[in-house]
Image: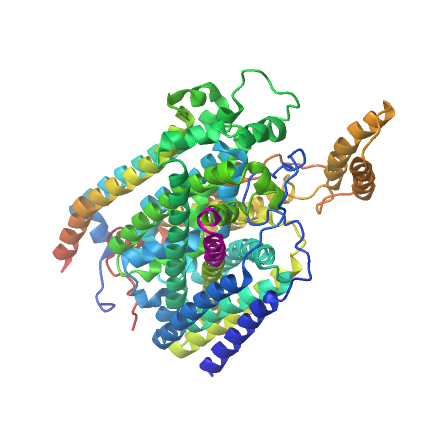
Amino acid sequence: MADKQYNWSAIAKNPKFLELHHKKTTFLFGWWIFSTVFYFLLPLGAAYTPTLFKIQIIGRLNFGYLFALSQFFVSWGIAMYYAHVANKDFDRLTRELVDELK
Amino acid sequence: MKKILIALTLALTLATFAYAAEPAKAPSAAAPAATTAAPTVAPAASVAAPAAPVTKIKANKVITIGMFSVIIAITMGVVVWAAKKTKTAADFYAAGGGITGTQNGWAIAGDYMSAASFLGISGMISLYGYDGFMYSVGWLVAYITVLLIVAEPCRNAGKYTLGDILSFRTEPKKVRAVAALSTVAVSTFYLTAQMVGAGKLMQLLLEIPYQAAIIGVGALMVVYVVFGGMTATTWVQIIKAGLLMTGAALLAVLVGLKSGMNPLQFFNDIAGSVNIQDHVQINLLKEAIKTEGFDYGQRFLEPGLLMKNPLDQISLGMALVFGTAGMPHILMRFFTVPTAQAARKSVIIAMFIIGGFYILTTLLGFGAAIHVTPQGVAAVDKGGNMAAMMLAQKLGGDIAPVVGDLFLAFLCAVAFATILAVVSGLVLAASAAVAHDIYVNVIKDGHADQHEQVLAARITSVFVGAIAIVIGIAAEKQNVAHLVALAFAVASSGNLPVVVLTLFWRKFNTAGVISGLVVGTLASIGLVMVSPNMTYPNKIADDAKKIYAPLEKKQAEGMVLTEKELKLVVDKKAEEAKNRGGKSIMGLDKPLFDLKNPGIVSIPLGFLAAIFGALLFPSKRSEDMFDELYVRQNTGIGMAKAVDH
């Protein structure tokens, strides 16, 4: 394994790698920014729009509580979606690239 | 030799607990909320509370010590098994890469969820309602950064430590030395907070002397790490995560049953509780007279009872979101799995466990508020740390007194396992930085055979553990709550920026790593040193005055004070006299920096320093090697097999 020498800059210019790199970057940073913005809406909302957070939606359950709870489901959702895309697209592209280099 | 040492430690630890079984001589001092990472110091919530009869939590010694012994015995079995498998450096630091994704997911959860999240957050919810729940959210969201940005690249490009990743395309010796220092700093801060918290907790639960608790916990953690390395540490973390989830789920079911398993009924019970309504009115909103028509119970489910400063909240959120992914003991977990796919799977499993746990914690916190009452929780511990324990005893006791004792003992054992798992992970991370980065790669230029590497790692672990015990004992009376904030601040401002830039930015280099780590770390430490986390004697004096001044005024108006009130006046005056004119450690009258969490300032500073450092001293070699690192981190081609050589 360690004996094999790779031409790294050639791999970096390989169209397969460029496609992988492009897809991954867009996906990862895009969803990271989304999740971060969504998370910071919670402390910001609690501090600056308390009236919104106090609105009771179902029985005693208010918007603020449901919004905080939704953070858990959104995080899990992003994680599952990422796993789906990575298993399907990123791993396939990686495998094809590795096969090409053999 | 090994067996003798294990037997010795076992004997020592059991002796510690046997000593505990004797009727306690040391009265358990009012334990400060050392185990919580609470962003705000809890006000003395019990002051205005109706006379609470219980001020101590009583665990059944025989059952509790029995359960502790079972946990110690099982984990020792794991150590003996793991020690046989630990032969090479890869075995010691990364369990030979033989941990599966699912196992690693449980281990990450076990590594991450400290006693502070288990006891502290349920306590915060029981005392402050909604804000405690909101506080818990950031601890899960932080894992999105771990999943998307660091987990897989670290598995693909790393080997055992943070230094391995950072030194890939830089001048290895300098970078490893600085990275090791930063790892040791983060681990020491976090470890000290955990050790002191552990000591206080064991003292409170078992009424054993503080020193004995620290030595007992410390001895066990050293044995796990020294003999079993990463394999034993991983399994201790997995066992702990399983116990923690079982305990939390059982207790949540009991809470649910009380409200007929109906969520809406549960929230009606919260808002309808007279004790909670009084607590909100008198202790939290400080209203002596009830405002007619105001729904104090519903107010408990709304934000703003604990977190008054949104900027501090955001700053804490930033420290979590960036800091978790920069924690060396968390990063290290990704080197134990064989592939990037397994690393990915492990983070996702960890996210479900951690998230599920925090949702259960909400039930426990609110459940404690309903069934134990906030006043009752605060009477035992002002920070609320005993809320979950008291709830277990109460709800179990409602079935039969012995069930209450059993359940409480079980949760004590869970807390004990929790502490052990977290401190072991930290000792291992710190030892890896010293032994692998500094000794093997800086001092010995990487020329050390497997035997020597493992020996170095073991000796280092003994030292790290011994130092942790000494610091833990020395810091008994210190205010350590800020150390958790500090650990996350350094990880988020020092470690994370340089990890991300190393992995994703072509122009990054040695100068960037060093300036980023140094500035990020120093800025965090500096800001925390002048923050409200430190003790300001003048502020204590002012607070004391606030309590006795109205009483004196009452006296001046001709009213007669009760004996208790007179004593309070004398005590508080003495407290004022003692503290007035004093300075903080930094010689300050009041904080220079108003936030408890420096992240909002120190994280941008860390990034800027790393970027400017790299731009000022460009390195052709680092740029040329970017392609290699970038291809490796994305694809895993040429991955350092954990089972090297």
Identify whether B590 is placed above or below A3: above
Report whether B477 appears left or right of B495.
right
Q: Position of residue A46 (x, y in %)?
A: 47, 26
Q: Quadrant of the C terminus of chain B?
A: bottom left
Can I make out residue B626 in this image? no
Return the residue nearer the eye: B570 or A48: B570
Magenta stretch encompasses residue B511 = no
Q: Position of residue B639 (x, y in %)?
A: 27, 61
Instruction: Give the dominant element type of the magenta stretch: helix, strand or loop.
Output: helix
Magenta stretch encompasses residue B412 = yes
Q: What residue range appears in magenta?
A: B397-414
Report whether B50 appears left or right of B399.
right
Return the residue nearer the eye: B265 or B355: B265
Residue with the most extreme bottom position: B1
Q: How many dots with numbers? A: 0
Residue at (66%, 38%) from the top-left corner?
B51
Check the image and tell me how it is coloured: rainbow
Residue at (42%, 30%) from the top-left corner?
B267
Return the residue nearer the eye: B424 or B206: B206
Residue at (13%, 56%) from the top-left corner?
A99
Can I make out residue B511 in this image? yes
Q: Position of residue B441 (x, y in %)?
A: 44, 68
